[in-house]
Image: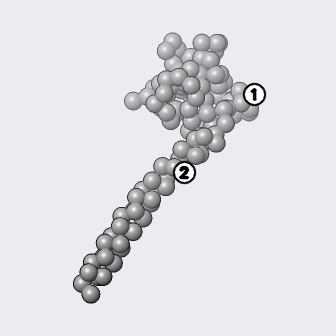
Amino acid sequence: MDCINDQRRLARRAFLLSSGAVLVCLPLSVRVSHAQDAKKVDMNSQLAKSLNYHHDAKQVKDPKRQEGQFCHNCQLFQSEKKTGWGPCTLFSGGLVAAEGWCNAWVKKV
């Protein structure tokens, strides 16, 4: 009888541990899937135009842009990458170019 109780306890413990692991990993997988679903920001969109967003900061003619300002070193850019594309808080998670720029640029701390 004790052997059966021990097996039940072990099975219950294994179930609880695996359930906990699933609960921890679930938010991570949802975040990754949302990032993969995101689309590149359209430079012709009303928001992009109002912020003077460009995929290539080097082509920006805005006097507000200073040398060295890119999306990848902006506080609003939500990726650690310095190349490629990443989400921006201003564009509701839309992907902006790491080498891009807009007039809402804020130095990353």
Q: Is residue 101 visible?
A: no
Q: Residue 93: percent from the left, percent from the top? A: 60, 40
Place of residue 64 in the rendered image (x, y in percent of width and height, measured from the top left): 57, 17
> What residue is shown at x 59% (from left), y 22% (from top)?
100
Q: How crowded is the residue under tag 1: few (<14 C-alpha within 10 Å), some, or many (20+)? A: few
Q: Quadrant of the C terminus?
A: top left
Q: Residue furthest bottom?
A: 1
| Above-or-below relation of 98 to 24 | above
Q: Amino acid at mark 1?
A: Asn
Neighbour class for label 2 at 10 Å: few (<14), some, many (≥20)?
few
Q: Is residue 24 above or below residue 101?
A: below
List the residue tagged with mark 2.
30
Closer to us: mark 2 or mark 1? 2
**Which residue is situated farthest in the left direction here?**
2
Is residue 100 shown above or below 22?
A: above
Cα distance between the residues tagged 2 and 1: 29 Å
Mark with earlier residue (2, 1): 2
Question: Looking at the picture, which amino acid does disc 2 mark?
Answer: Val
User: Residue 6 at what x, y percent from top left?
Assistant: 27, 78
Along the viewing direction, whichever of 57 and 106 lies nearer the viewer = 57
The vertical placement of 9 against 47, above or below, is: below
Q: Is residue 108 left or right of residue 13?
A: right
Name the residue rendered at 66%, 32% in the picture: 40
Residue depicted at x 59% and y 25%: 97
Q: Quadrant of residue 99?
A: top right
Q: Quadrant of residue 46?
A: top right
Q: Secondary structure at mark 1?
A: loop
Question: Which residue lies under the disc numbered 1?
Answer: 44
Please identify the quadrant where the N terminus is shown: bottom left
Please name the residue shown 64% across and 42% down the image.
Answer: 37
Q: Residue 90 at x, y = what percent?
A: 59, 37
Q: Is residue 74 visible?
A: yes
